[in-house]
């Protein structure tokens, strides 16, 4: 309220005179035109060539050959090409130096094409095309033509603006990225009509997306959701950031400048959540939703201009944006200026773990959140069903998964325990929640323990497991227990499935071996595998499968808007086979990312890791080097380890840090997000037996968050 009041006051004073009013709109409109030209025009020869090509397919009634104006496609909607053609023509007409600059014949054709669009009013079956795609393009066209030698007829301009006003959506009915996108063409219309009231309304809607919410948008844990309670840091999160930043840069040093709490929220989200999901130039596939099935989806090089703008808008953090630009642009190493941290996003069931050597994340789903949307309506995101069941993106260089997805075996997703189905099911709705309440993690901002109660009876999957991850500096310990299935297919836990790059080594019976391409199986006789700067250690053996082979697939198989051509890629896949219809099976493995050579694995101090328990009641790991004990308590009771004991009256996750140092800490989280209190009794060396009553906030904003208590010395 304070922000909006100040905005109103500043705006009223700013527009005290008509000359100032005109100057502002003239300045903003020119900035928008320059942005459009920068994004659209590569060079004058290319602009002229494209315009010439467009004119060869122009028809006298104002249409273009090869466009079917009756099509209503949801994703790739052919009639939008009509507006794209007009924008190219308009740029040629208004760009000095173009062969078509101020060409009267071209201007008449632009006019006819706009009149045809208004008269026919093509419509898509996707609201997004009608309320965002088309009106945004129209706004750009009209702003470009505003500088033309000859203006559009007033009646045609009025018709086009009226349709934008009354038939192209309302940002008040939208949230997150969609709110910003609809409000953008409201802002275009305000600039075209020099309407300060409309401009304030549009910017109020745009900036309002920069607030914490329990609905779609930036969450109270600093994650991002769209399409219901669905993780979408990339995709819609990217769109929201881009929309806000492209607008905010126009208003720097004006009364409409993004500032205060709104700027704080944007800055915090971009710097502490969005950018850390990017390793080198590649974003984690876990945060992209259905967008992961698009060509070149992981590459974020197009963000560089956006980050350059942010360095101006959020000048206090200029250095961080420049460092991110260096990483994404590959002028510096992927770990350049990365600070170690861990964040568990309790609102979105997502965990992000960053170190200089690697980035690792965990994507889960509970009965509070939604699975990745897949294959419904827009023809993309097929085969993603298991992607929400504990998927891990393991990135060292950032290129581990580049465009691998057409050839991926989607029944062997890294980190996931699932049946090896031939046909991957499609969820019944694009918003399909998980089934378990006990999902989440405890985090002290550096280390974390995460649990996922996997149980799924949909489409005869009929499988379950208790999965846990223990995240430290050099290692991630992965445990699974109570693995059961009534499905007729083999149940696997996949350690990784990434591009096969470089050599693969194993240590078997204490002998180092380099492997040739092929398929391998090992039964309790393999110590570790090394590939792509990642070590995979098996402390308790297992029935291990390893594939170093070519895999085939097509983009069309996961995205019906893309080509059907068959592609081949060399793929590294490592998994543990639990057999058909297992009962109470287990697994344990340790990921060691950032290992540059297999010789480092030979001398790795794996004894630092002590797997204390992997049962249906407790999963626990003690890290001797860090003096940290992490425990997933699947039920109430007493857990003991050496001369330590922990008693809890309800399931939870906890971490004991600094044991016996006099500066110990206890971290606790209620993963089911249903408890008001959890009672604990802790007995550890050097500390008097202590009783803790962890009282959780009643606010829904923080349910699932971690609580910290000091451990008092004797």
Image (cartoon, rainbow, N blue to C red):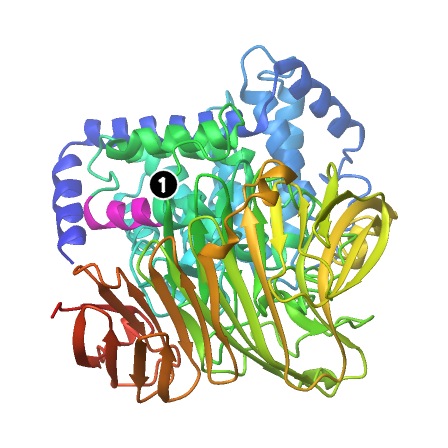
Q: Which residue matches tag 1?
A: 339
Q: Residues within 10 Å of mark 1 (few under 14, many from 20)?
A: few
Residue located at (19% from left, 45% from top)? 260
Q: Horizontal placement of 367 versus 312: left or right?
A: right
Residue 530 seen by the camera: yes
**Residue 603 placement: quadrant:** top right
Residue shown at 77%/26% (left/top)? 53
Element marked by disc 1: loop
* Residue sticking out furthest to the top: 97
Q: Quadrant of residue 217 in the image?
A: bottom left
Q: Nearer the viewer, residue 17 or 266?
A: 266
Residue sitting at 22 percent across and 30 percent down? 253
User: Would you say residue 229 is visible in this rendering?
Assistant: no
- Which residue does the image show at 49% across and 40% down from the upper left? 357
What residue range appears in magenta? Answer: 260-269
Of the 4 image quadrants, the one containing the C terminus is bottom left
Left or right: 252 as drawn, with respect to 631: left
């Amino acid at each position: 309220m304070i922000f909006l009041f100040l905005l109103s006051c500043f705006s009223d004073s700013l527009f005290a005179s008509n000359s100032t009013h005109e100057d502002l709109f003239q300045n903003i409109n020119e900035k928008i035109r320059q942005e459009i030209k920068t994004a659209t025009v590569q060079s004058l020869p290319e602009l002229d060539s494209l315009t010439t090509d467009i004119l060869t397919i122009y028809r006298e009634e104002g249409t273009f050959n090869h466009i079917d104006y009756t099509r209503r496609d949801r994703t790739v909607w052919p009639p939008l090409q009509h507006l794209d053609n007009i924008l190219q023509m308009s740029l040629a007409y208004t760009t000095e130096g173009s062969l078509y600059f101020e060409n009267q014949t071209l201007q008449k054709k632009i006019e006819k094409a706009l009149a045809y669009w208004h008269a026919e009013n093509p419509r898509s079956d996707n609201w997004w095309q009608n309320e965002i795609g088309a009106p945004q393009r129209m706004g750009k066209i009209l702003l470009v033509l505003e500088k033309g030698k000859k203006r559009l007829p007033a009646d045609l301009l009025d018709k086009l603006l009226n349709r934008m006003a009354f038939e192209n959506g309302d940002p008040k009915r939208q949230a997150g990225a969609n709110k910003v996108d609809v409000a953008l063409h409201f802002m275009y219309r305000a600039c075209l009509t020099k309407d300060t009231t409309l401009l304030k309304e549009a910017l109020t809607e745009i900036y309002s997306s920069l607030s914490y919410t329990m609905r779609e948008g930036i969450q109270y844990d600093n994650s991002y959701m769209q399409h219901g309670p669905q993780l979408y840091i990339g995709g819609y999160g990217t769109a929201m950031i881009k929309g806000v930043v492209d607008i905010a840069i126009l208003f720097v040093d004006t009364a409409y400048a993004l500032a205060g709490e709104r700027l704080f929220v944007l800055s915090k989200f971009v710097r502490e959540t969005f950018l850390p999901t990017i390793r080198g130039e590649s974003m984690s596939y876990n945060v992209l939703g259905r967008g992961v099935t698009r060509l070149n989806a992981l590459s974020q090089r197009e963000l560089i201009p956006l980050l350059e703008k942010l360095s101006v808008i959020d000048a206090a953090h200029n250095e961080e944006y420049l460092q991110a630009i260096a990483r994404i642009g590959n002028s510096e190493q992927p770990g350049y200026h990365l600070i170690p941290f861990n964040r568990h996003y309790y609102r979105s069931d997502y965990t992000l773990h960053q170190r200089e050597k690697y980035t690792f994340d965990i994507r889960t789903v509970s009965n509070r959140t939604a699975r990745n949307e897949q294959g419904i309506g827009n023809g993309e995101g097929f085969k993603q069903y298991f992607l929400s069941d504990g998927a891990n993106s393991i990135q060292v260089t950032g290129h581990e998964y580049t465009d691998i997805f057409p050839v991926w075996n989607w029944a062997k997703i890294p980190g996931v325990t699932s049946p090896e189905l031939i046909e991957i099911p499609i969820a019944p709705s694009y918003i399909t929640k998980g089934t378990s309440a006990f999902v989440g993690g405890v985090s002290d901002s550096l280390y974390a323990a995460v649990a996922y109660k996997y149980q799924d009876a949909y489409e005869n999957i009929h499988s379950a497991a208790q999965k846990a991850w223990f995240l430290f500096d050099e290692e991630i310990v992965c445990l699974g227990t109570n693995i059961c299935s009534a499905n007729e297919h083999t149940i696997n836990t996949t350690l990784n499935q990434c591009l096969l790059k470089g050599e693969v080594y194993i240590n078997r019976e204490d002998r180092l071996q380099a492997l040739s391409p092929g398929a391998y199986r090992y039964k309790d006789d393999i110590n570790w595998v090394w590939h792509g700067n990642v070590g995979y250690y098996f402390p308790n053996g297992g029935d291990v499968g390893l594939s170093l082979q070519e895999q085939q697939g097509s983009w069309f198989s996961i995205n019906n808007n893309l080509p059907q051509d068959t592609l081949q890629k060399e793929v590294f896949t490592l998994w543990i086979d639990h057999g058909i219809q297992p009962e109470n099976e287990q697994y344990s493995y340790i990921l060691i990312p950032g290992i540059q050579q297999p010789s480092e694995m030979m001398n790795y101090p794996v004894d630092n890791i002590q797997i204390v328990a992997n049962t249906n009641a407790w999963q626990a790991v003690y890290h001797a080097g860090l003096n940290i004990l992490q425990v997933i308590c699947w039920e109430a009771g007493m857990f003991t380890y050496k001369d330590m004991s922990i008693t809890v009256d309800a399931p939870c996750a906890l971490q004991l840090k600094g044991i016996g140092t006099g500066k110990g800490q206890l971290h606790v989280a209620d993963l089911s997000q249903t408890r008001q209190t959890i009672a604990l009794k802790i007995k550890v060396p050097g500390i008097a037996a202590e009783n803790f009553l962890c009282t959780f906030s009643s606010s829904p904003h923080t349910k699932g968050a971690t609580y910290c208590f000091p451990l008092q010395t004797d």
